[in-house]
Amino acid sequence: MTADDLDRVVEVLGGKRVAVLSGAGLSTDSGIPDYRGAGRVVRKPMTFQEFLADPAKRQRYWAGSHLGWRSFAAAVPNDGHRALAALEDAGIVAGVITQNVDGLHLRAGSRRVVEIHGSMDRAVCLRCGQVFSRADLAATIDRANPWLDDPGSVQLQPDGDVEIADVERFVVPDCTVCGGVLKPDVVFFGEFVPAEKFREAVSIVADAEALLVVGSSLTVNSGVRLVDHAARRKNPVVIINRGETRSDRRAAVKLDAGTTETLVHLAERLADASAAAGSDEPRRAE
């Protein structure tokens, strides 16, 4: 990233209200890996259909997810998350739409956040809809599985899961209200983004004059659809991501760069541009 790169972004976004779409690349500096970054081994996460159909797969999923939750929950927002929160405070960012399930935008101080893929800090019953705190559920799992211990160095996955082989003794938690199947309140592969969540995301794009994509390869269709919504409104799109994305050709500016350092510098430049635009407004007659 060079000063010229930032100049190009500021030229497009300066003086505009900006909607933000964030992906896993924003959370890598908080210790949460992404699915598709350089050097990542190709991994096929469990689908919703597999989770529903096979009790043994639910057993494997919950055992791995429980071990991963300990590391996942300990992650803290990085400077990129905080830069976006500061831009919202300054009235520049209209809202954040995130594909991440880590809750780090909210913890960084962003207020208008749509988690289109849900959040790992909740679990939901698929029968009655009761929602449970993940922290409370983790305590229940610990009591039911005292033999299950952190193996020392777990291979954390982007969804908070870890790979674990020996799970035959694992006791899967059930809903304490109706006895139904519990799952983390996230969109699994093979599930659709809830319609109301997508409408909330579209409303953020509609309230803005530009779209900034950070840390997403836009492989998931929901992200591409949001770029489409911005394009139909003739709002410029800026993409900051390491590697290609599915919407590079639609971007007014594409930076192949890390998100954290870019957002920190960009927040300073956009705040300066906003302040300069405000100082240029005609003064009201006394």
Image (cartoon, rainbow, N blue to C red):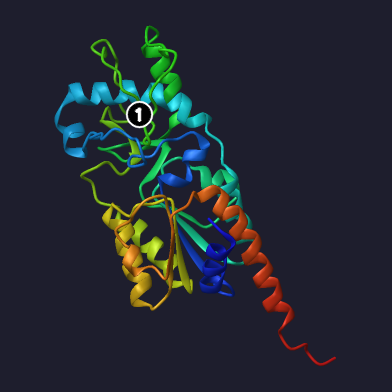
Front one among 260 and 135: 260
Looking at the image, residue 268 sits to the left or right of residue 230; the answer is right
Q: Residues within 10 Å of mark 1 (few under 14, many from 20)?
A: many
Give the SS element for disc 1. Answer: loop
Q: Position of residue 220 (x, y in %)?
A: 28, 52
Q: Is residue 252 visible?
A: yes
Residue reaching furthest right? 286
Q: Position of residue 28 (x, y in %)?
A: 47, 39
Position of the C terminus by quadrant: bottom right
In the image, what residue type sits under mark 1?
Asp
Q: Position of residue 239 (x, y in %)?
A: 43, 60
Q: Quick check: 136 above or below 45?
A: above
Q: Is residue 90 visible?
A: no
Front one among 185 and 1: 1
Looking at the image, residue 149 sits to the left or right of residue 259; the answer is left
Q: Position of residue 38 (x, y in %)?
A: 36, 40
Within the image, what quadrant is residue 199 found in?
bottom left
Residue reaching furthest top? 147
What residue sits right under mark 1 in the picture? 161
Identify the residue shown where x is 23% and y is 12%.
168
